[in-house]
Amino acid sequence: MLETKTNASVTGKQIACTLYGITQCIFHIINMKFIKQLLITIGIAGMTSAATAQTTNIILQTDFDGDAGEGNFNNDYGYAYAGSSAGSVPAGYSGGLTAGAGVGGTVANSISPDYTLLPTSPNWTNASLAYVFAGVGNGTQFGGPMTAITPTAVLGSFILSADLQVLGLLPSLTNADVTITKVQFLDSGNNVIFDFTGDAGFVGSNFVHIAVPLSSLSYGGANGGDATHPVSDFTNTAVIASIASFTVEFGVQSLPVGTIGGNPLISPPFGFTNNGALIVDNIQLIQTGNTVPPPTQEKLIWQADFDSTFPNAGGYGFHFRDGTDNAIGTVATNLTGGVGGSASLEYTVDLSSWSGSPPISFSGFGVGADENPLPYRLTSTNKSSYRVYVSAKAGGLANGANTNISAVMDMLFFVPAGAESPSNASPAVILDLAPTVTLTTNWQSFVFDGASSPIGVNNGGSQALFDQYLSQVNEMRIQFATQGSPNIGTQFGYGTNTTIDIDSIKVVQLVQATPPVTVVKTNNQVEVLWTDPTTGGTAELQSSTNVAGPYLNVPGAASGAASPYTVPTGSKQQFFRTIWVP
């Protein structure tokens, strides 16, 4: 998204109140001093409005313990695989329902891959192969739904949760990336109606509780489901009524792995052993009704107005062209040249030396600001999570030329020297979001959303690198550069005082605000369910006997990992909400 206007934002807090499992009210408060008044007003007006009521249906569930929590569990299975560009290599697996393997020593589905024979295969050690790979899968099948599914276009109302653990990794690894390889809805003939895949996150030797809405997963693909039934069929009553069973599958896989090019240090994440394991426990898929999507809020990464705030590493200017680049330039703070007479960061370049030997292929110049180190670690690999507010202008265009010029804005993410490899002797760009713009001789305010920004146009980087090295990002740059190829000099008349300015930079990460709580009654017990925001931090459960508060922390419920909370039998009427904890 690109807007040529000033864009103001309001950060709010989401409040969710529940009338003991009957009704849930969700508010988006933009001014915290009105919270108490607003809650009381809503309470007086009546809290059983159908417009705000939320229900929860358990579509499938199992705790593998053979008790009331078994739900509609049908069958468990596992598998392991390995292969190469030249053929298959031997791999096996063992395991299944295992006592003591689950959360708190309960039963869980534990699958162990056997990679002990992999080194004996000539495919695995053939240095000329393009790739080799290995993986393990852990699957669970369920029968008909316990409660009828309600047709809906809101995929975010379906939430898959589970407890995951990965054991026996190589000593150099603390966790492995677990994939949701299948969430399948099938008909009575075991034909796939709907199919979703996606990422569950990084999991290690401690159980990790996940809660993933279907809206965050990819639809269709290799497992089918998208050819005959588009995702819009979730609104089709007849299609929904034909659902008879389900498959939920998780996997740990790597591509490439193995001894490639004679390097014996590369192996499956479990090594060439048979003592690793992918353990899955407490699977549940619920559908919530009339759910208000969790709001997002802006978390400031850094800002610079060049008056009171400056980037940590300062500013810089640059110019480039084919052939000999003998132009000279200076970067400095223009104390009165910014928006509204404030200060700006300005780069001035003398292009007069280019007139005798003009560029014939490419040329340009630009200015940027550099924040290093970042004030906190980034938490999302989704480029849509990042937004930039910035103002910019160009100056010194040739007489008679247009008052505007093509340019590009770059939002650059860097990792330190040596992060990618020992030969990476300087900081490296792992992601470059680079939307094009048109600069004029007057100040313009822009808003750039990562969702619509292309990757790697000018400075390299990729989504894959960003996924891999996010935790090591310690530097960001925001820069503008003129795009006057092949010869920018003609548009500025080879002037001695051509300029480009930036001002009012604000870089934010869009994070999910606190999700709402859900209350469900199961086996005459009232349970409160909640999840942590997917973009970082935790959600702490609070309760009060009065809708207006005060709210107190529920002991032992400091994160979504403690969900569900069982309300003690005989408790007074209570109201619940969650608060976000960084």
Image (cartoon, rainbow, N blue to C red):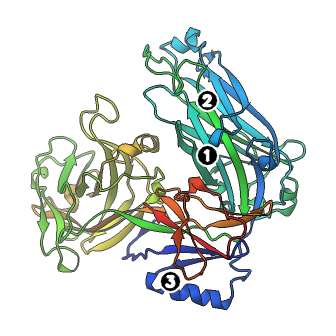
Q: Does residue 557 appear in this view?
A: yes
Q: Residue furthest right?
A: 188
Residue 228: image location, x then y, percent:
80, 49
Q: Which mark is residue 35?
A: 3
Q: Local crowd at mark 1 within 10 Å, few (<14), some, or many (≥20)?
A: some
The quarter of the image holding the C terminus is bottom left
Question: Is 433 on the left or on the right of 337, as rendered?
Answer: right
Instruction: Work out whether residue 309 or residue 65 is closer to the camera in this orientation and state it.
Output: 65
* Residue on which disc 1 sits: 198
* Cα gap from disc 3 to disc 2, whole angstroms: 48 Å
Badge 3 or badge 2: first in the primary sequence = 3
Residue 155: image location, x then y, percent:
68, 60
Badge 1 or badge 2: first in the primary sequence = 1
Question: Is 572 on the left or on the right of 449, as rendered?
Answer: right
* Cα gap from disc 1 to disc 3, whole angstroms: 37 Å
Residue 388 against residue 364 in the figure, above or below: below
| Amino acid of disc 2 | Ala
**Dot 2: what SS?**
strand
* Residue on which disc 2 sits: 277
